[in-house]
Amino acid sequence: MNKFKFFSSCKTIQELKTTFRELVKLHHPDKSTGDLETMKSLNLEYEKAFEYIKTHPINESEKKFSYYANVNDGFRETLEKIIFIPEIFIEICGSWLWVNGETKPVKHLLKEAGLWYAANKKAWYFKPSDYKAKKHKAFSMEDIRGKYGSETVEKKERTKVDNPQAAK
């Protein structure tokens, strides 16, 4: 898969998604290390690499996974919808987004973005569309962070370029 700049080492869809999330954290326009053109290239290449891996699985388990996988898993789109909401904290744990902070005033925006509220954790979450729930005990956020790791998504205020309403 050396025809890809960002994802040449990815052999499975899971590797691709993990690499994509790491690169988004690095190249998002809101980060000091990111810019819009790189992010556009990253998004385009991600979709092409996803299609390539989905149609060229390397083993039986990957074939099974690719059957259920969906390019529009919503992670990227959801993150882009909520990244500019002030006073919230976005955390990535495994393949889930968790949001907390001052969420009550913006709960309608979180719902519109596809997040659900977990009352026992007092946090909003987004899970991949291909996630299948298993019956198990409820985990605390500390347990989830310990098991899957945790990365905080840094945010900046929306600029006039990002916010068409502010330009009016």
Image (tube, rainbow, N blue to C red):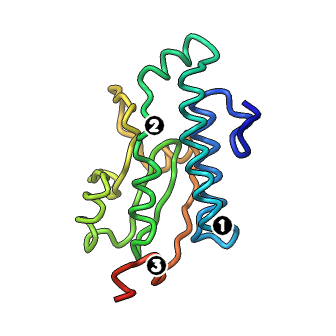
Residue at coordinates 54% horizontally, 25% vertically from top-left?
Answer: 54
User: Which residue type does callout 1 highlight?
Assistant: Gly
Residue found at x 30% / y 52%: 114
Q: How many marks?
A: 3
Q: Position of residue 29 (x, y in %)?
A: 59, 68
> Is label 3 in a helix, a strand or a loop?
loop
What crowding class fits label 2: few (fewer than 14 Cα within 10 Å), some (14-19), or many (20 or more)?
Answer: few
Q: Amino acid at mark 2?
A: Val
Q: Quadrant of the C terminus?
A: bottom left
Q: Which mark is residue 116?
A: none
Judged from this view, the residue extending furthest toward the top is: 60
Mark 1 = which residue?
Answer: 34
- Label 2, label 3: how many angstroms apart (C-alpha)? 27 Å
Answer with the quarter of the image where residue 100 lies.
Answer: bottom left
Of pointers 2 and 3, the one earlier in the residue sequence: 2
Q: Is residue 82 above or below residue 2?
A: below
Residue annotated with mark 2: 71
User: Left of 154 or right of it: where is 113?
Assistant: left
Q: Nearer the viewer, residue 72 or 112?
A: 72
Task: Locate residue 102, reporting x and y percent.
Answer: 34, 73
Left/right placement of residue 24 relative to residue 108 reads right
User: Please, is residue 163 above or below residue 59 in the view?
Assistant: below
Q: Amino acid at mark 3?
A: Arg
Which residue is found at the position 45% from the left and 45% from the top? 96
Cα separation between marks 1 and 2 = 23 Å
Secondary structure of residue under mark 2: loop
Q: Identify the residue under disc 3.
A: 158
Q: Position of residue 98 (x, y in %)?
A: 42, 54
Disc 1, SS: loop
